[in-house]
Image (cartoon, rainbow, N blue to C red):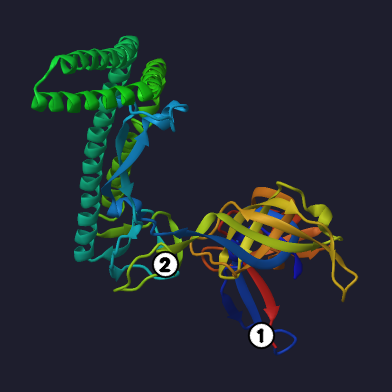
Amino acid sequence: MKKIISGVCAAAIAASCVCGYIFIFKKTDTTDPVAAKEVTVRRGNVTAGVTETAAVNVETIEQSFDLVLDSVSISASVESTSKSSDNASGTASGKSGKSSAGTSSTTTGVSSKTESASLELVVDKVNVTPGQTVTQGDVLMTITQQSIGNARTQLKNAVENAELALKQAQIDESKTKLSAKYEYDTRVAQGRNAQAVYNAALSEIAQNISSLSSQINELTSQISSTTDTRQLSQLKTQLGSLRSQLSSAQSTRAADELAAKQKYDEACMYYKNAQDLYNAAISGVGNATEQAKQALESAKSDLAEFEKNVGGGKILAAHSGTVTAVGYTSGDTLTSDTPIASFADASSITVTVNVTEDDISVVELDAKVDISFLSFPDEVYEGCVTQIGSAVQTAKSTTVSYPVTVVLTTAPARLLSGMTANVTFISKKVENVLYVTNKAVITEGAQSYVLRKDPDGNEEKLSVNVGFSNGSVTEISGVSEGDTLLIKGKVS
């Protein structure tokens, strides 16, 4: 709907029409009485332009209950992982023989088992209703003290569990460091003594064969010189045993020397890689402690956040504005899925009107506009043109129009989506002038005058000068602000 308006803002226009009716019966050529309507001279702005009407779109801001705290059920969990030093070397795995340098180590870590749990806070009383205007910090609803106490206990337990998890992580990482250092020292010592140990092993093999050979020669000599039948039998038995041992030692000599060589090679390898193996063993040291520290900080933060926002048993408004919806009633449990309340966002109120191609020349980006509302007829607010859309033509009409979006820079506190707004794109404005409704100005030829009512109630005809008129109100001089003027007409 389009109309050409005159007048200040809607408030000023309405004010200029504040009036009363006075019936004055005079003897005229007819029997019809004359009625006089009183209007007041006002001061303000007189504007003219193109006015279009559309529904208001008020964006909403939701205030949600987001205290779904991961730390609520934190508990310390000790996990053990076996690591083989052979695998760490990359070459020793699968070789025969045994070496103390290749022993396995166990690393113990602490993880925080986290099960997301929502605090069960029960609504005691709801203090607001849709359509109510609130200020940031006002109490929206209260929470039962029992549920507050239970939630606080959960959060404190989470902090205690996180503290225990941190201590356990620190202890276990200290053990890991000590074990890695012990293995490092052992590998270094074995590597430094590897040659001596290898030489001793070869010497022991050779000495064992030599000793067996000497014992066999000695027994052979004794047998040849012994005549005692019983003693001779014992010596022969011993000789057979020694020959068997010598044969075994000679047949396994190569294998025994190879095993000694393998141990020597392993000890040298571990000695060479001792630092790398040590670094690998402690590579994860610090991670578990850092994770436990973060879990503790999270638990403490959750407790502090709870005390700040809910601990007093009150849910406070996070925004100022008109409440458009409330998500809970008494006895409900707060959840993250349902907003506590929704508010009209005063910073995001728009009106999109369609302006025909005949009038679009009046519209400019970033230009200020006047806005009035059917729900608030005596008030005028300001807006700004933020977007001019592409031309639109409906199938039933040949008229081309352009969607124009206006953002309100001032608005009523109780403005709701869907309310009807009149947007005036200003083509001309005179500011801070005296004005009166056009009906109060009488024009005779080139002269204009008004009928003014003096303090005694008498009527006087007063010449005035008129200026800009928007078709509804007229700029006027020759009168004073607050003067009462009369508009006369016959009553049939």
Question: Which residue position is annotated with label 1?
Answer: 33
Quarter placement of the N terminus: bottom right
Instruction: Give whichever of 389, 432 is nearer the camera.
Output: 389
Residue depicted at x 40% and y 54%: 318
User: Of helix, strand and loop, which one carries label 1?
Assistant: loop
Residue 155 x %, y %: 25, 52
- In the image, residue 263 sits, relative to residue 121, either above or below, namely above
Residue depicted at x 20% and y 56%: 153
Question: Does residue 390 appear anywhere in the picture?
Answer: yes
Residue 315 x %, y %: 32, 59
> Residue 115 occupies which quadrant of the picture?
bottom left
Residue 447 x %, y %: 79, 58
Instruction: Give whichever of 208, 350 is nearer the camera.
Output: 208
User: Of helix, strand and loop, which one carries label 2?
Assistant: loop
Question: Which residue position is annotated with label 2?
Answer: 132
Quarter placement of the C terminus: bottom right
Residue depicted at x 73% and y 56%: 425
Instruction: Give whichever of 396, 74 is nearer the camera.
Output: 74
Is 362 positioned to the left or the right of 186 in the image?
right
Count the numbered circles shown. 2
Q: Amino acid at mark 1?
A: Pro
Is 65 positioned to the left or the right of 119 in the image?
right
Q: Which mark is residue 485?
A: none
Q: Disc 1 versus disc 2: distance between alpha carbons?
A: 50 Å
Mark 1 burial class by Cα count in 10 Å: few <14, some 14-19, many 20+: some
Q: Amino acid at mark 2?
A: Gln
Residue mark closest to the camera, 1 vs 2: 2
Residue 50 x %, y %: 76, 60
Question: Does residue 475 appear anywhere in the picture?
Answer: no
Residue that protrudes farthest toward the right in the picture: 398
Residue that protrudes farthest toward the front in the picture: 227
- In the image, residue 469 sits, relative to residue 258, either above or below, namely below
